[in-house]
Image (tube, grey):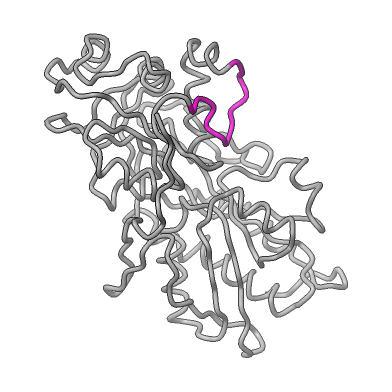
């Protein structure tokens, strides 16, 4: 099916604190935060689209407290966050998948990677009359995205879900057209749970670029996928749970490693994040299909990227203080936005990583 790019202006509107709202992907008034010198300073960032609702709310509240530094964040996607950091054109980037050694080698210095957010990928569907929490396992999801199951009233789907009265409606699988963390997450889940998927894609290595673009529709960013689902009866696609929650989508319950069908929620995403306690790192970040009865199998951390050595000490201090707030006080907003608070062990990891920020002479900055 022909791929079409979603226009950012059609994105969901994410409500912020105090009744303010910002359209995801659109230009918006910059938030302002304070630095040690009291001088105005600008922090430009770019990266993951999935974290946009969380960043918007947290940056907004931070700006109310500290009005001296301007934060501009462009939710253009994880690949943009990585490339912008490599080119040193932003103060910070963000990516759902940490930079690998080959990516770090292209940077202009040592890059610190800080987990700042715990989220999940919802499988959302627009099927009139379908119940909430439709039960889907890996092999059934794979068959949908392979184009093997093509109608919602398919006997195979009825057998898998236990629902026999789904409508006679064509299934429209929606995937990301851009490189993204959610694509990596779902691909990894299907690799773990469907031999047919591995055979079809020809690899056991998950990809940020959706591997089977010949089936379904490709859309840019979470906002594009969400817009398409909302406008298209029969559509099913994967979006950050925060987007699904705000849109009021109907989400599937996904079979996890122990055989339970679990819907995305702050609680089930938190259960997945807790599995990373004491072992999470930028090279050991995968929490797809972790064990546990209440664990949601499509969960992920989001990673902020910044240079360890900062040419401007005031910028370095502003970054340290902003992201210390994000990983502590900012986590209080996570659950209501469709995310989960960072586990305490992950907060400790993030604090320790932020403490490594240096000035141009290689001296640690004192926060």
Q: Quadrant of residue 156?
A: top left
Residue 30 in sight in this render: yes
Q: Residue at x 55, y 86 (%)?
A: 68
> Main structural element of the magenta stretch: helix, strand or loop?
loop
Q: Position of residue 35 (x, y in %)?
A: 62, 82
Q: Whole-percent x and y of residue 285?
A: 60, 38
Q: Is residue 208 magenta?
A: yes
Q: In the rendering, at what x and y percent does residue 197 appear?
A: 49, 16
Q: Residue at x 34, y 42 (%)?
A: 267
Looking at the image, which residue is at 31% across and 29% down?
Answer: 172
Task: Please report the residue visible at 48 percent of the width from the left and 41 percent of the height from the top.
Answer: 273
Q: Is residue 67 above or below residue 233?
A: below
- For residue 26, side relative to residue 253 (left or right): right
Q: Residue lying farthest right?
A: 361
Work out whether residue 258 can be spotted: no
Look at the picture and state if 299 lies above or below 141.
below
State whether residue 366 is above or below residue 329.
Answer: below
Residue 75 is left or right of residue 4, and the answer is right
Total marks in image: 0
The image quadrant of residue 110 is bottom right
Q: Is residue 100 above or below residue 290?
A: below
Of residues 17 and 267, the one nearer the viewer is 17
Is residue 335 magenta-colored? no
**Quadrant (top left/top right/bottom left/bottom right) for the C terminus:** bottom right
Where the N terminus falls, by quadrant? top left
Magenta residues?
A: 202-213
Q: List x then y, in percent, for residue 150.
A: 30, 18
Residue at the bottom extreme?
A: 38
């Amino acid at each position: 099916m022909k791929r079409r790019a979603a226009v950012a202006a059609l994105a969901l509107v994410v409500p912020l604190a105090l009744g303010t709202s910002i359209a995801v992907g659109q230009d918006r008034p910059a938030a302002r935060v304070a630095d040690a010198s009291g001088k105005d300073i600008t922090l430009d960032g770019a990266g993951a689209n999935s974290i946009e609702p969380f960043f918007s709310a947290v940056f907004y509240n931070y700006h109310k407290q500290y009005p001296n530094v301007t934060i501009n964040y462009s939710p253009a996607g994880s690949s943009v966050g990585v490339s912008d950091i490599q080119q040193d054109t932003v103060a910070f980037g963000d990516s759902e998948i940490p930079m690998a050694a080959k990516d770090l080698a292209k940077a202009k210095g040592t890059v610190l990677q800080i987990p700042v957010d715990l989220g999940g990928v919802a499988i959302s569907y627009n099927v009139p009359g379908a119940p909430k929490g439709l039960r889907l396992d890996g092999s059934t999801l794979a068959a949908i995205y392979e184009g093997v199951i093509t109608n919602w009233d398919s006997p195979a789907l009825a057998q898998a879900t236990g629902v026999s009265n789904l409508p006679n409606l064509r299934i429209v699988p929606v995937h990301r057209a851009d490189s993204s963390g959610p694509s990596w997450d779902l691909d990894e889940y299907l690799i773990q749970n469907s031999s047919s998927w591995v055979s079809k894609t020809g690899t056991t290595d998950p990809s940020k670029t959706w591997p089977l673009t010949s089936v379904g529709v490709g859309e840019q960013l979470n906002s594009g996928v969400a817009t398409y689902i909302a406008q298209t009866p029969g559509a099913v696609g994967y979006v950050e749970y925060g987007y699904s929650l705000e849109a009021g989508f109907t989400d599937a319950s996904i079979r996890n490693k122990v055989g339970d069908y679990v819907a995305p929620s702050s609680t089930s995403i938190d259960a997945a994040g807790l599995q990373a306690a004491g072992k999470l790192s930028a090279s050991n970040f995968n929490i797809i299909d972790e064990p546990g009865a209440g664990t949601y199998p499509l969960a992920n951390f989001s990673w902020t990227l910044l240079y360890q050595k900062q040419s401007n000490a005031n910028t370095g201090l502003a970054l340290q203080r902003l992201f210390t707030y994000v990983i502590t006080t900012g986590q209080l907003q996570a659950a209501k936005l469709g995310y989960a608070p960072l586990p305490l062990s992950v907060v400790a990891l993030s604090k320790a990583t932020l403490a490594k920020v240096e000035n141009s002479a290689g001296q640690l900055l004192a926060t």
